[in-house]
């Protein structure tokens, strides 16, 4: 394609505007979270302070920030682990033909397409009929997995479609057992992708709102806590919380990406 | 990401049968292996997807009494749900949101993916900019919605800007808490779901085809119309499915960004659930599910996306 001329620059400008559109609002609340003590939810800035961050850690100011953060983190870690294991396992299964493979594939895709409100309602009904109290570590965990697993399985599909099967044949020819070829050939090669699947699982769960709202039972996760705050918070403490949790998410994303790149480099050197 | 690793030279390996120390998989085990490996996925999807959806369908026929649900087989919930003009009106509103947001995300998403795929020279920059577009997907939707308050609020940046320019002399109330804000938030949240699949398909377009078209005398518009758009259709349809299903089932964006002034089908279901009117919520949910499946089905009829995987 032509890489110069007004059309090229117009397209690049459009792209730049899109990035501003994507990041602008979030950056704004990050700035506003440093509002001075008398500042409000909008510009202008009335001084600069850390007051609203300090506010977060005073227990009575915002509901149950510590508790909801702990719950969200634990839930996200469990979802991450399960997503990696189940997606990897299913990805290995889908490399061969087996009875029901097509049904399972379409079930996985449906999980992506069925509106989240239906998952919430269905799980709520099921727990109701079984007379079990919904909670963040049972019903919400299941609800989150219906969202993270399709992404995990589709990533594994893509990974194994591009996997060079001659490597495994070579391992087998050299006398490796199926377990050995998985452990020493396949896993090291797909490790960066598995890290990616884990990252997806963690982030999608940590920030999930729609599927948690009606399945979390009596204890709030962090996104629910933030949502509850939006209805009654009139101070930038809301922005401070948003800033902290966004930075936390971004920190995880960057950290994990660096880890995956390092692993990929090591795999290449080995 | 394809692992680019040197293929070990198999021909120099020991001749077959020379040293076979490895145990080969027994045929019986090999036969049941895929079933064992896919079992966890089956279990999770059965318990948290298939059974719940079946429950919804069953409960939609149950009787809603003051004491709770009573198993029965009545059509009252559907009659109540579909008999009211409010429901139809809400469906129209939701579909209107879906169409508007689809058109906007498609336009923006396609252009962004096109720039990434065809107008960024180095593959490193391509990956970096792709990540830049994809990272917000991994941050909280609720916070991304909240972050519009300082822009669109009564004293927000947009109003100040408009007043400074003298376009209006009083703050515009309709910016936040309006259908406009709902659409804006949807586009903000979901354009990525267009960019990613379209970019993915565009990267697989053979550049020689574009060259050939230009050699044959096609201008930029013809190349776009006859080469790039047709070959990007699978990505476009995957993005469309994402955006349409997300908007059709949404309740939170509409509730937050319209300030309770606008309705959506998801919101009807959510409100019925909050009031513990499960059978009514279920009947609405079944209608919503059928609507969404109909939409997805018609997209899949037009474009086969299976070869995309």
Image (cartoon, grey):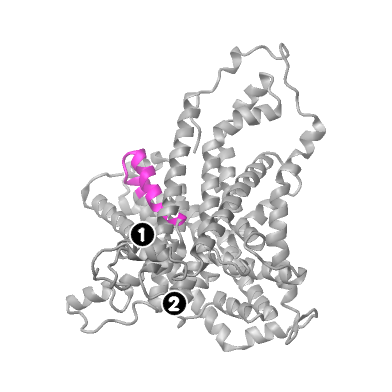
Q: Residue B274: percent from the left, percent from the top?
A: 61, 78
Q: Residue at position x 76%, y 46% from top?
A: A99
Mark 2 vs mark 1, foreground winner is 2
Could you tell me which chain the residue with mark 2 belongs to?
A
Query: Magenta includes B15?
Result: no
Find residue A232 and name its label. 2
B131 is within the stretch colored magenta? yes
Mark 1 crowdedness (10 Å alpha carbons): few <14, some 14-19, many ≥20 = many
Q: Main SS of the magenta segment?
A: helix
SS at mark 2 in the image: helix
Q: Secondary structure at mark 1?
A: helix
Q: Quadrant of residue A71?
A: bottom right
Residue placed at 33% from the left, 56% from the top? A19
The residue that disc 1 covers is A22
- Share a chain, discs 2 and 1? yes
Give the magenta range: B116-138
Q: Can residue B183 be spotted in the picture?
A: yes
Determine whether B86 is above or below B35 in the image.
Answer: below
Looking at the rendered image, the quarter that the N terminus of chain A falls into is: top left
Q: Is residue A165 visible?
A: no
Q: Is residue A141 left or right of residue B257?
A: right
Relative to B294, is B210 on the left or the right?
Answer: left
Q: Chain of mark 1?
A: A
Question: Picture coordinates of residue B107 (x, y %)?
Answer: 38, 62
Residue beneath the point at 54% across and 55% down? A73
Dot 2 or dot 1: first in sequence order is 1
Q: Position of residue B41 (x, y in %)?
A: 69, 50
Q: Residue at x 31, y 65 (%)?
A: A32
Q: Residues within 10 Å of mark 2 (few under 14, many from 20)?
A: few
User: How far separated are the C-alphas under marks 2 and 1?
Assistant: 26 Å
């Amino acid at each position: 394609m032509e890489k110069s001329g007004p059309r090229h620059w117009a397209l690049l400008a459009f792209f730049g505007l899109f990035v501003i559109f994507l990041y602008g609002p979030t950056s704004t609340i990050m700035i506003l979270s440093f509002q001075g003590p008398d500042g409000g939810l909008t510009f202008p800035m009335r001084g600069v302070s850390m007051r609203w961050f300090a506010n977060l850690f005073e227990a009575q100011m915002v509901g149950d920030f510590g508790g909801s953060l702990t719950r969200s983190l634990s839930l996200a870690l469990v979802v991450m682990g399960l997503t990696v294991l189940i997606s990897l396992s299913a990805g290995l299964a889908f490399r061969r033909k087996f009875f029901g493979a097509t049904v399972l594939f379409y079930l996985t895709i449906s999980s992506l397409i069925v509106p989240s409100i239906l998952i919430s309602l269905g799980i709520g009904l099921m727990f109701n009929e079984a007379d079990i109290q919904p909670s963040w570590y049972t019903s919400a965990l299941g609800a989150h997995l219906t969202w993270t697993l399709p992404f995990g399985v589709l990533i594994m599909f893509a990974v194994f479609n591009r996997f060079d099967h001659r490597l495994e044949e070579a391992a087998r020819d050299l006398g490796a057992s199926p377990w050995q070829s998985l452990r020493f050939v396949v896993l090291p090669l797909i490790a960066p992708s598995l890290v990616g699947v884990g990252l997806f699982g963690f982030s999608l769960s940590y920030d999930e709102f729609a599927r948690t709202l009606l399945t979390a039972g009596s204890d709030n996760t962090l996104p629910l806590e933030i949502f509850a705050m939006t209805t009654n918070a009139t101070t930038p403490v809301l922005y401070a919380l948003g800033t902290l949790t966004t930075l936390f998410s971004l920190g995880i994303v960057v950290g994990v990406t660096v880890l995956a790149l390092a692993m990929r480099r090591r795999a290449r050197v080995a | 990401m394809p692992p680019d690793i040197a293929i070990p030279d198999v021909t120099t390996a020991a001749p077959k049968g020379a040293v076979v120390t490895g145990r080969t998989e027994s045929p019986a085990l090999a036969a049941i292996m895929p079933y064992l490996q896919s079992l966890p996925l089956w279990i999770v999807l059965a318990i948290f997807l298939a059974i719940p959806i079946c429950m919804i369908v069953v409960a939609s026929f149950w009787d809603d009494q003051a004491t709770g649900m009573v198993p029965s087989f009545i059509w009252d919930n559907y009659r109540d749900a579909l008999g009211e003009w409010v429901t139809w009106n809400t469906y129209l509103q939701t579909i209107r949101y879906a169409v508007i947001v689809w058109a906007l995300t498609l336009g923006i998403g396609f252009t962004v993916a096109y720039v990434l795929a065809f107008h960024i020279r180095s593959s490193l920059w391509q990956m970096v900019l792709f990540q830049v577009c994809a990272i917000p997907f991994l941050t909280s939707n609720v916070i991304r919605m909240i972050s519009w308050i300082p822009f669109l609020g009564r004293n927000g940046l947009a109003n100040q800007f408009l007043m400074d320019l003298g376009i209006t002399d009083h703050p515009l109330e309709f910016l936040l808490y309006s259908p406009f804000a709902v659409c804006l938030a949807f586009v903000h949240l979901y354009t990525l779901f267009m960019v990613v699949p379209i970019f993915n398909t565009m990267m697989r377009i053979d550049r020689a085809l574009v060259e050939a078209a230009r050699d044959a005398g096609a201008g930029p518009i013809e190349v776009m119309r006859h080469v790039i758009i047709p070959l990007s259709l699978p990505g476009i349809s995957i993005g469309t499915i994402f955006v349409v299903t997300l908007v059709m089932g949404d309740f939170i964006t509409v509730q937050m960004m319209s300030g309770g002034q606008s309705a959506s089908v998801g919101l009807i279901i959510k409100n019925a659930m909050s009031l513990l009117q499960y059978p009514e919520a279920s009947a609405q949910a079944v209608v919503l599910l059928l609507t969404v499946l109909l939409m997805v089905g018609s997209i899949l009829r037009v474009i086969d996306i299976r070869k995309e995987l």
